[in-house]
Structures are given as structure tokens and as C-alpha cells.
Amino acid sequence: MKTPELSACHELEALLPAYVERSLPAAEADRVAAHLATCPGCQLQVTQLRALTDDLDAALPEAPRTALRANFMAMLEEQKALLNPELPVAAAPVQPEAKVVSMWPTAIANNWMRIAASIVLIAAGVFLGRQLPWGSRNADTFATTSGQPESTELRQALAGRSTSASDRIQLVSNSGKESEPGDPTVQVLLNTLNFDASPNVRLAACEALYRLREDPRVREGLVNSLAIQTDPNVQITLIDMVVSMRVRRAVPQLERLSKRADALPVVRAQAEAGIGKLI
Amino acid sequence: MTTTSTSDEELMAAVKADDLDQLVPLFERYHGPLFNYLTRLTNDRDTSEDLTQTVFERILKYRSSYQPTQPFKAWVYQMARNVHADYWQRKEKLRAADVEEVEKTGGLRGAAFSQMRISSHHDDLHEALALLPTPQREILVLNRFQGFGYEEIGQLLGCTAEAARVKAHRALQALRKIYFAN
């Protein structure tokens, strides 16, 4: 006989998860229910187990980046090429009748290859923009000056048609290293984010703005920018930023984005996940 | 789970017969769940993407060993477990050599977003899960996030369904204690 209550609780503890998921045989379930009626400690456990189960059920799945699919498609194409060494790999000229045309997977692979290549280029661009001192004539003139004139020069430099995208990335990346509230750099960076022709420059502007996130205009500007960006990399970066900065005002924009027919599925999924995190 | 009528096993049988394009629908069905499973085990999204890719590489590499009578799901998760185990063995070495490189070339979002490599969904729950010992976390992830029944978990972990159930319940109690601590 289990007289002391503690040992009864201890014994029942192992049964409580099954009790909560209603998988106990009726006799045991009755025994647990009878004990629960008299034991606030075990009642609390049951309440917690139910809450935990609900939270586990509500947990959103993690979504991989599009790069995973791109890498997979690239790997698959490689393996297919290995399997059929007589088939053309790339440049080898072949007679049309010997060519195996695998219609849609190849088309997808090409698209994903393009996306993969663009990601590599962006990463390389940002990396070079940050790491290498070349292009130092522009950098000396515009980016290394400090304080108020910096933003004016930055704006002029960014507006200059002759400035290449990589120079603009460097300018943007170098901006906002140290700044105080009210810094006009923020406005210049927001303009760059919204209107620069190159997604890579826009991404660099995202990064620079993230460093200036204390400025209230950044939060506002990011939310507004969500509505107008069409490049998936920029869209995803913006979503990540508003989520990480917990900008609740972004929820309506995220909702719109999650329903936009022209957005990539991964962007819509990311927007949806973002809403889940913000509300 | 599927939008076409072709079963996982039929698709994998075709892959085994060197029709590699049939791996594409399997990738579509499984890469999300596998990525999730691996992310919960490693707490690291970047690593999990690499490991998910490795799982699909191994599927191709070892396709001839696939028996069409065995459920594809069990086979592929067994492979994912092995990939994860291999990762753990390499982890210490990798850590020393790669962290710096990843930081430097980590790309678009840079260090500002490094905290986001680990999920920011349901933070408390995720943190509590991360504090569980890996075997307990794995069993909960399989049961709660991957839709594995106790029978399937038992097969994967090499124990009976009843033992899997008991382990899952213990893990849930352990998680409860962490989650509601303080």
C-alpha cells in the first residue's frame, strides 16, 4: 500500500504524460484521476504538461534557405553527369539527336544555379567591400571622412551614376560605423535601400542600417521598404531584420508579403514565420 | 504529405535504378522535415543545411543498398542520424578551424545576425529543448515535430515501441521541469 503521499506522487509522475495524451488504460487513468483530485502538486504538473504539449504543437518548423535547394540541384546535376559521362557536361558540342532533354528539372536547376551564383556573388561582394582597401580613392574621398559631411558626400557618391555597384557597396558598408541619433546617414541609407538599382547594394544598406537600429527612423524605414522590395534576398533579409528587432508594426506588411503572388514561396514562408514570431 | 500518387518507396526504387531525377520529389517531401530534425539536434541552422545536403548526397551514394521493401522514411532518417553522429565526431576539430572562417565569410548578414543562426521561434521552448540531453531531445523531436509514432521511433532507435513510449514520456517530463523552472 502506498501510504505516504510523496511516494504516490513519485510513482504517478511517470504516468502523467500518458494521462495527458490519454493513452493510459482506463483503470490506470481512473487511479491517476482519483489521485489528482486530492493532490495540487500533481495537478500543477498536469497543467504544465498540457501547456507544454500545446506549445510543442504550436512550434513553427524551421525553414531552410533557398540555397539548400540550389545546392541539392547542383549536386544532382553533377551526379547525373557522372552517371552518363558520354553526355555533354557543358561546352562539349553534341549532335542534337544524342542529347537527353530533361525538361523541367534542368530548367529548375538552371534557375537555382543562377540564384546560387547570385548569392555567391553577393557574399563575395560584401566580403570584398568590407575587407579590401582597394578602390581607396573613392573611399578616401567619401567614406573615411567623419561626422556631418559624411552623409552629404555619401549621398552624392551614391547618386553619382559613374559609381559602380561595388564602390557603392563599400561606401554603404563603411557608413554608419559610428553614429549618433539624428544622423543623416540613416536617411541616405534608407534611400539607398529603397532606390538603388543593385540588390547587392541594397543588402549592404540593410546591414549598415542594422548597425544603426537604435535610430527610430530605421524601424519605420524597414517596414516601409518591405512593401516595395522585390528581390528575394532583400525581402528575406528585411524580414529577418524586423523579426530580430521585434518591429511589431511590420506585421501587416508581412501579412501582405505572405500573400503576394509574385513573391517566391520561400519568401512567403519566411514572412509567415516572421508573423508567428512577432504576434 | 504527397501531392502525387507515387510513393516514396517507388521513387527511391527508381533512383536506385539510376533515374536520379526521381530524387527531386523525395527532396521536396523530406528536405524540410530533415532540416528541422537536424536543426533541433544541432541548434545550428547553417550546419543543419550542410548536414541535410550530406543526407541527400549519401542517399545517392548508397542508393544501391536501398531495399524497396523497407520504408523510405525509416531509411532516410537512419541516414540522417548517422550523418549527425559523424558530425558530432568531427565537431571539435571543425569548431576550432571553421568558426573564424564562418565569421569572416558568413556573408550577407554578418555578425549582426549571428544570433539568428539558432532559431528565434518560440524562444523559451527552443532554449529548454536545447538544454535537454541529445537523446531525449531527439526522441521528442521525432515524436512531436516529425510525426513519428512510437513504433517507428523504436525501429529507428533499436528498441521496442513500449520502450520508446516510456523514453518519450520521460523526456517530456524532463522538458517540463526545464521549461517551467523558476
Image (tube, coloured by chain):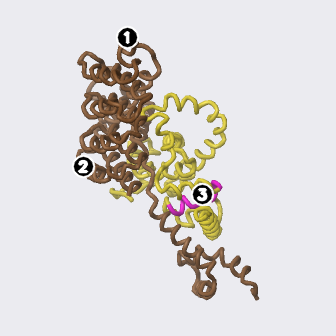
Chain colours: A brown, B yellow
**A229 on left or right of B69:** left
Quadrant housing residue A85 = top left
Question: Can you tell which mark lies on residue B137?
Answer: 3
Discs 1, 3: same chain: no
Quadrant housing residue A90 = top left
Q: Residues within 10 Å of mark 3 (few under 14, many from 20)?
A: many
Q: Amino acid at mark 3?
A: Arg
Q: Earlier in the sequence, mark 1 or mark 2?
A: 1
Question: Can you tell which mark lies on residue A260?
Answer: 2
**Which contiguous range is marked in magenta?**
B133-144
Where does residue A144 sit, x and y in percent of width and height? 41, 18
Residue B136 within the segment the image draws in magenta: yes
* Secondary-structure class at tag 3: helix
Q: Residue furthest top?
A: A137
Judging by the rendered image, the residue that carries numbered circle 1 is: A137
Front in this rendered view, residue B154 or B96 = B96
